[in-house]
Image (spheres, rainbow, N blue to C red):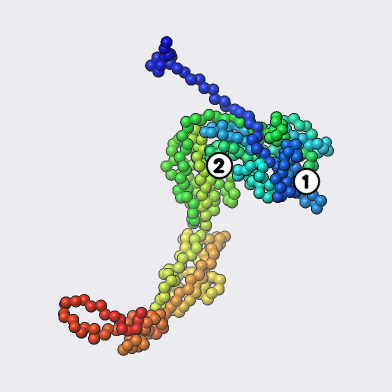
Amino acid sequence: MWLGGTANGNYGPILNLTLSSANSNYCIDNAVVMQTYPDSVINLGKLGGNLKVYKKRNNDGIVEQTYAYVKFDISGLNNQQAESAKLSFRGKTGDANFNDLFKLGLYAVTQDWKGDTVKWKTKPSINASKMDTSLLNSSSARKEFNTNGTKLIDFINEEVRKGSKSIGLAIMSFGKDSTDNMWIGGLANGNYGPVLDLKYQTVYGSIPPAQVVLNPNGGNFIINVNVKLVNKPAKDSVFYTIGKGTVEDPTRNSTLFPEAGLTFTDTTTLKVIASRDGVYGNMVTATYNVLPVASPVFNPSPMVKYQKKVEVTISTTPADAVIYYSKDGSDPSEPYTQAIQLTQTTTLKTKAFSADFAYETPVVEATYQIVNTEDLPGTGPAGVGYKNLTRDNQPEVGLWLKPEAFTGLTDGSEVKLWNDMSGNS
């Protein structure tokens, strides 16, 4: 009796594997939150297991929301990139007067949750951007959320990339007021429950992309800044998004980062993410604060005191910027053309303008202290020095020695430290 081995060619053992490229998953957890009952965990058993999804005006005319959370297991997608995703549900409105009027929105939940603990006051956060939409009408046939771009698939793939074992989604009514006689099937309703259908590409053994390194990685800049990628492997594709304030995360449908880099002439937030063989890396975010004119700088430093006078210069960039200053504490209004001579303690204020005066910097101020010393006798022994060297009309340094300390010394035999007897500290 024998079996072919590795040396026996087509007589060797073969293991045939079939990898599914699609699956359908019913939700594994669900919850309902009601603005009307902010401190309560809603008992779905009392709702027949259904998920309520509506908004309605209360007796005071204020619109209050009721919406649902659903959770799906994605652990089977480990190291696989989903290529399409569809969420479907069964539900209806029991009021024929509202047929086809009610729109449902699908939102990404950005933190984990457990259905038996969720309250309105402590409900999990959701992304404000609606992913997909659907209609709720008087038919209980299964309905799908209509795809709105790639937001749902991008959310799922990002959670897969992070190693998440599940995803949470929120379903709520939007648009006009609705009736409370609106529901969708939940976890307890068997084949009436929400279903997430996924199709994906198997990428077992793929090496994740290298971490994106930006140069510079954010900061403050004048006029413009050019941002480049550092040591990007040839196999990696880097996608980016830019904007001000809230910036959407980049996906494989975003713009490729150019080899020459990106140049910003205004304050900009940049988000980048690398992809290799369908696997995403970690997203990198950097903000570049770009101003047309730098805040003016005084020279020399105002942190020390000056004897009798000091010559102060003011500088900024770019070279065509216009500088104004004042010496009397008022708002800067005097054009700066040459160094400023100060012979007494003075507070300088300055600000700079762009060449077209479309931009001005905040006011910068500095106080220069001028000390006018005179060669007059001090108050120490023999009229030399004073222990406080900042006192007006005193020499800057004075040293007074007491020769009696030589007693008992032989020339060259010892170095002796003598105390300063002038009264200086």
| Quadrant including the N terminus | top left
| For residue 316, above or below residue 53 | below
Question: In this orientation, which residue lies closer to the viewer: 301 or 171?
Answer: 171
**Which residue lies at the image location 70% right of the left edge and 50% below the top edge?**
39
How many residues crowd around disc 2 within 10 Å: few (fewer than 14), some, or many (20 or more)?
many
- Please provide percent x and percent y for residue 45: 73, 38
| Quadrant including the C terminus | bottom left
| For residue 321, above or below residue 7 | below
| Amino acid identity at mark 2 | Pro
| For residue 117, above or below residue 415 | above
Q: Name the residue that disc number 1 marks.
A: 56
- Please provide percent x and percent y for residue 226: 47, 49
Of the image marks 1 and 2, the number of the one nearer the N terminus: 1
Q: Name the residue that disc number 2 marks.
A: 250
Splitting the image into 4 quarters, where does residue 101 fall?
top right
In the rendered image, is residue 313 in sight?
yes
Between the C-alphas of marks 1 and 2, the distance is 36 Å
Dot 1: what SS? strand
Q: Is residue 419 left or right of 309 when viewed as pictured?
A: left
**Which residue lies at the image location 26% right of the left edge and 85% below the top edge?**
402
**Which residue lies at the image location 68% right of the left edge and 41% below the top edge?**
31
